[in-house]
Amino acid sequence: VQWAVGLWQSTEVLCNALPQDITCLAADRMLIFASYDNILHAFARNKEVVHTYGGHKARIHLLQPFGDHVISVDVDNILIVWNIQSEEEYLQVDFDKATFAVSAVLHPSTYLNKILLGSEQGSLQLWNIRSNKLLYSFPGWHLAVTTLEQAPAVDVVAVGLVSGHIIVHNIKFDETLMKFQQDWGPITAISFRTDGHPVMAAGSPVGHIALWDLEEKKLMCQMQDAHSTAIAGMSFVPGEPLLITNGADNAIRVWIFDGPGGTGRILRSRMGHSAPPTKIRYHGQNGEQILSAGQDGTLQSFSTVHEKFNKSLGRGSINKKKSKKKGLKLDTMVLPPITVFASEVAHQSDWDNIVACHQGYITCTTWNYQKTSMGAHKLRPEEFSKHKPIDIYATAVDMTSCGNFAVIGLSTGQVDVYNMQSGIHRGLYGKERAHEGAIRGVAVDGLNQLVITAGSEGLIKFWKFKTKDLVYSTELSSSPSGILLHRDSGILGIAFDDFSINALDIETRKIVRTFSGHHGRINDMTFSPDGRWLITSSMDCTIKTWDLPSGCLIDCFLVDSAAVSLTMSPTGDFLASTHVDDLGIYLWSNRSLYSLVSLRPLPADYEPSVVTCPSTCPMQDVDVAGDEETCDEMIEYVSPEQLGEQLVTLSSLPESRWKNLLSLDIIKKKNKPREPPKVPKSAPFFIPTVPGLIPRYIAPEEGNDTQSKVVNLGVLAQKSDFYTQLEEALSTNEYTAPLRLLKSLGPSNIEIELRGLAPEGGGSMEVMLSFLRMIEMMLHKKYNFELAQAYLALFLKLHLKVLSSEPNLLEEVSRLSMQLEETWIHLRTLFSQSLCVLTYVKSALL
């Protein structure tokens, strides 16, 4: 069994994803060019690789589309011009690194076949690509050129320098038109507005953007902290007051300039974590939102439906007002990253519904999902309200299903309860502390009756939620590293420091399952919505699925980077995972929902295969499809007609084929069409009279046009296939063929066939006897049980008078009656036993 035949399959697989990180990107009106290492690819329709260019021996760091050609420059200072369609080299130029190390490339507007190159030495060169000639050398400003940008005016180019200077230069006359300087370091990107406003935007390594007025030749305004990291690229939309920026903080933003002062505001944005996520959990019961906490200190919500529903709840802060005044770079009030959090949808429109613990910090914060912001309360014990301890911090948290209370565990073994609406401390468990060691996990059951706590000393304790009394305590085989409660089933998953996993039933308070097989620290666990599966991830880079009813491992696969956190959708369709040193959240689809999947236990010596996270290579896609076909053939199971001779087996026919056989006459009456109105007979012109002394009219004759349409089938009937097979079965005593034929007929045809068995319908007493023996065979073998009842009931309804007058048939019917009674007594006994056991189980648990 390979992963391809397992439970989880990566979603949104890109059939032509590049095998390494993309280092350079450019686009023209038809294609998108992307490079990794020394290979350049051209994508069509954003997903299909149509061209590949291989010829560089070093990493490509500059790209420039150029009509029917594309120019690439590598770090060894080799420039290659490629023909896009033929994928051939048109031109190759080698530059000496000591005198001219290429750092920027630009095609000046209206300059046919010419490119402008900037260097780390500060000089510029204008080249004719077609003739391979150097047309002009600009001496430059003796500072490295970081970027080149075409101005809206012809012959004018903006040059960004490493010193923070921006030179607006006329390359036709080689003269500087204006000069600006920024104090934030090298210029990373430049763009010009083209909607009638003479404005130039320049990016910096610290995330600020400066807007320069080209008419007044002065700084117009600053957009500070546009990104939390360096501005990687920016571009004004042609003819629109819109600026698109992106940075290394994993964000792309669209700014609109429609307000006074010339500054921009965010119109739209798409952003993720700028540092790897540490904890993810599904929010709500619809399976559409995933809450994610990252090492960048932010809490974000990601939609599995569409990116436009994503939202950021912001970064944790000790004092939000002071943080806003100080700004992003100088903020000393920022809280450490979130390590664990809990959320509930109940009362989320009334008060804060998320509570989070921070790394090495005793105070827990509340968050409001509706307002997408940090909440109003800071939850910490009263004795630490005035001073912050150094070695005491919150380690575990959980919320009640009603959304009213939060239970927080500390590294000292103390467990506190807080009200989410007011933030008031509502008590603690135990006299001073609940455990001797640090709290490794807390959980509250679905009815707010029990609180379960796990301590590093190896104890699991059960507490009354309301009275805070200790109910039960059990010692574990090892120190737990975390716990997770499935509230609907009452199963508590416990992960241990020795890499094993236990499942504990909170009703009986006993260990019901023990799993082992991981070879590294268990990072996270999640239950399937029905509580049948427990999915675990470990530092050994495996993700394993354990089947709780059978106690077996049913799926296991390896990933390149260990999964830090796991969460399964409440609807059961997706498993989400985050990985070490990875910014993304990966979705794995549950293949058991839409295809045949083997859930047999994996062997003890099973070697899992390595699975690439979503965005896989083409060859792996082909392998997955091939293995899937093999799997379906391997695990296909054909059910026999009858599992056992002692079992009463029903047929697989739909109810419409047998349930209404006794009501066919009623159905026909209901479905009978109404007779159309009869045209009245035309009256004669002269009404005839009876001759005599007293004149009298002749009474109209009663029309007797209708003739009986009932045909005597006994005279004209032909023997049907069913009739013939019943006659043959009298001698062979084999009734499989007539039964198979009867099962293939519809209700009306079945009635016609049974009516034709009687002598007045063209049948005979022998054939009626054969039909009764067929029913006896069905009852004896105990299969097609409901069909036997339905066919026999219709037969008795149609031929009761004939049966009562024939001794042979009457004797056969009496034997059938005894056999039916015996079978029903057996079934009734089994039903009574099952109901008794169910009633006992329900009353015993209550």
Image (cartoon, helix red, strand yellow):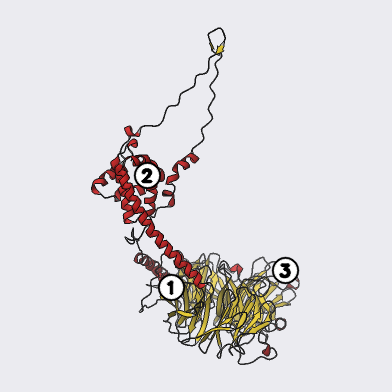
Instruction: Choose top left, top right, bottom left or bottom right for residue 758.
Output: top left
Which residue matches tag 2?
A: 795
Which residue matches tag 1?
A: 549
Q: Residues within 10 Å of mark 2 (few under 14, many from 20)?
A: many
In screen coordinates, is 290 left or right of 39? right
In screen coordinates, is 840 left or right of 115? left
Closest to the camera, between mark 3 and mark 2, is 2
- Number of numbered markers: 3
Which residue matches tag 3?
A: 258
- Secondary structure at numbered mark 1: loop
The residue positioned farthest toward the bottom in the image shown: 390
Give the camera-side residue of 410 and 805. Answer: 805
N-term-proximal mark, 1 vs 2: 1
- Secondary structure at numbered mark 2: helix
Q: CA distance from mark 3 to mark 1?
A: 62 Å
- Whether residue 378 is visible here, answered yes or no, is yes
Q: Amino acid at mark 3?
A: Asp
Q: Is residue 690 above or below residue 119?
A: above
Q: Amino acid at mark 2?
A: Phe
N-term-proximal mark, 3 vs 1: 3
In screen coordinates, is 741 left or right of 60? left
Q: Which mark is residue 505?
A: none
Q: Is residue 802 above or below residue 648?
A: above
Closest to the camera, between mark 1 and mark 2, is 2
Where is residue 535 shown, x and y percent of the image? 47, 76
